[in-house]
Amino acid sequence: MASIHDEIKALFSWNPPPLKPITLPGRKPSTSSCQPAIYDKHISPSLVLRHVKRLPTLVHDLAANVDRALLAASEALPPVDDFFTAKDRAKILKHVEKTITDEKGVANFYDKTAATFCTPLASTLALHPTASTADWTGLLIWTHSVSSSGYAIMDGELRIFRSASDDEVAEREKIVETMESETRRIFEVIGDSHLPFATWEIKSPFAGPLEVMLAVPNLGVFSWTSCTHPNCSTDQTHINKRRKTADIKEDDAVAPLWNLEESLFPTKHLGSSASILSEELSVPAGQASSGTKGKERQEEEEPAENRKRKRKQGDGDEAHKSRHDLTARNLVQQAWAQAVRVDGTIIILHSGNHELVCVRHRKSQTLYVSDLIEPPTCKDPGYGKLQVGIYLAAIQDMMDRTKQRLPKSQPKSPDGGNGGNPSGGAHKSSRFQGGAGGKDPGVDKLVTIEKTIQATSKRDMLLLYLQYGIYDSPIPASFIRSAPPIMAKATIPAPPLSPRAIRTYTPNECLSIVLTSEIGRGATGVVHRGALKLNNGDRSTLLDVAVKLAFDSQQRDMLRTEYETYRRLRSKGVLRGLTTTLGFFDDTEGDLCALVMLYAGNSLLEEPERILSVSDCRSALSTLVSIHHAGILHGDIRRENILVSDSGVTIIDFSHSKQCDDQGAMDIEYARLCSFFGFE
């Protein structure tokens, strides 16, 4: 039997087989990617990417770090018994599909091969080199069930393994106990944060072709795609908040494993690095760059009406949408934005047969990029060693940065903030006046709210700002009302139905909403809490609102269904126990849509200990009966969709609703709601 050192050496020289991209009959493969999401466009200017620089020594720096770590741990390594040996790898590869049709196939292959083979060794070398009894049980996992989605597109991450069973917990606790005290303290802080060590942006070979990957290291000065609406905010409150976030600077590692000064070397032809990229695959980066620019320009000139038509014709399928051409710039912006959101340093751009390793330098707002890597033909280092090096570096970088923060402040909260709630969850202690979630208002306040709702229904332009966590909109995203308002008492002219109807709007003709937190996400999209501001001459009114944003075609259809259900229910006289709906809007620049409603409180799931009065319970049941009498089956009665506040109980989320006359189905829904209230 080979020794553990022999097997590690074999792993270091291991390369995956090449993946074979294929197209399915009758389906055109995706060669494109969505343009930057609304969240990407509203990241604080102090956090966006400014420069992309080539770092040709990065791969060898990572490999040298592996050698140092292995030398330090060589005397205490576990036996070979449970290590993924060369024989084990060969068996596994026989059962992993090597023909792929999309990025999911690429991610699945990486997960079952490189990630599976390399995480145990990286975990041992970086975190518990003296745990000789661990039998190669690691503390890491690579997964495409990621920390965050719906913002930028992140397809994979390296994070701490979350044990499920008592046996798993006990086994991994024994490993943690072998760590040095300082390492253990830092590791536990990282575990509490739930943040990943590194992030992967994965594309299929169709969407991440060689030309695009070659262009990435040569992007140079980077122009971040921000919201381009011409009406920049003049609101002093917003200006003050923007100033507060202008000085946000995340920490870089004190002792990085890479020499960034090497990025000053003159750019050479990437194909000349024979150990990384074979000669026959070399393409001049300049040619690749010019080709992608042409596609990008063509897309920018395409009328919005044509893009909308494409969307309606059914090409919103995630694997085969072609709304926007993928360019190196879009790929890099997506990857950088997601790394900012999870405070990551190491970013991997991977498309199966090609890969780039990137380092995010926060202080200079620069992305340093390796030369192009060809996984099937890697040599000096082999692909296995390179992946172990990436994992090691990601762990050591995060340990370094976490250690810097420990003496200065308390550990970060699970959502990544410093004890606050920058990226999600309602701030339960703060309630805006005017929304349905506030305390029971007096008569005068109710009159003011009603007048504000009516005025809101007469305004068709929505200016949407993001003002939480890493987001700070310098200018708003603009949305246009695309469905008649539900709440208008009198008949008013039909709203514009497409972005082509945009005209110049004065501040007194617009609605302004500042999104202040994320409070939920699901099949329909992402739900935020925010403050709606309505200017009326010299005065303004605030409403506490919830805004649902839908991104892909399925979500948009579900959100429109929900809006139309609210309209039908109101036309049938169902008013009590439903949230007030203020409008349905389409993004003027992209494919998002938004449903704006008054905020109605926290869900039964969030407040399981809350005791409801018998009157509130009966009121909620009465609301459901009224919904059924209107011929509507809710379709998704869950604790998450029952909201409670000082104003009463509200039933929300009609995205799964349908017209129905099946009394049996209605009785089942009614019984389910009764069970939430303890009624038989």
Image: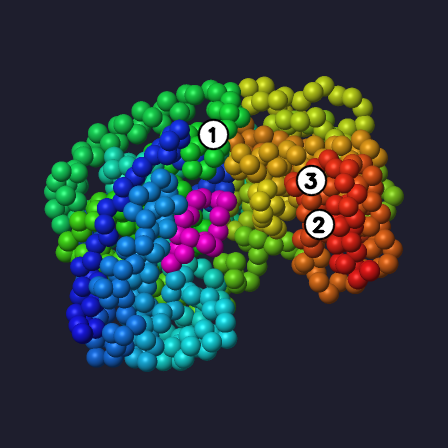
Q: Answer whether labels 1 and 2 touch (C-beta < 8 Å).
A: no
The amino acid at mark 2 is Ile
Q: Residue at x 45, y 54 (%)?
A: 145
Residue that label 2 marks: 637
Residue that label 1 marks: 315
First in sequence: mark 3 or mark 1?
Answer: 1
Spatial separation of the CA atoms under disc 1 and disc 2? 31 Å
Spatial separation of the CA atoms under disc 3 and disc 1? 24 Å
- Tell whether 639 sits left or right of 629: left
Element marked by disc 2 = loop
Residue that label 3 marks: 657
Let me know if residue 149 is in the magenta part. Answer: yes
Query: Can the viewer see residue 515 in this picture?
Result: no
Between 585 and 174, which is closer to the camera in this rendering?
174
Location of residue 638 in the rendering, given as x and y in whole percent from the top left corner? 69, 52
- Tell whether 302 sits left or right of 13: right
Q: Residue at x 43, y 21 (%)?
A: 302
Element marked by disc 1 = loop
Q: Quadrant of the N terminus?
A: bottom left
Let me know if residue 459 is in the magenta part. Answer: no
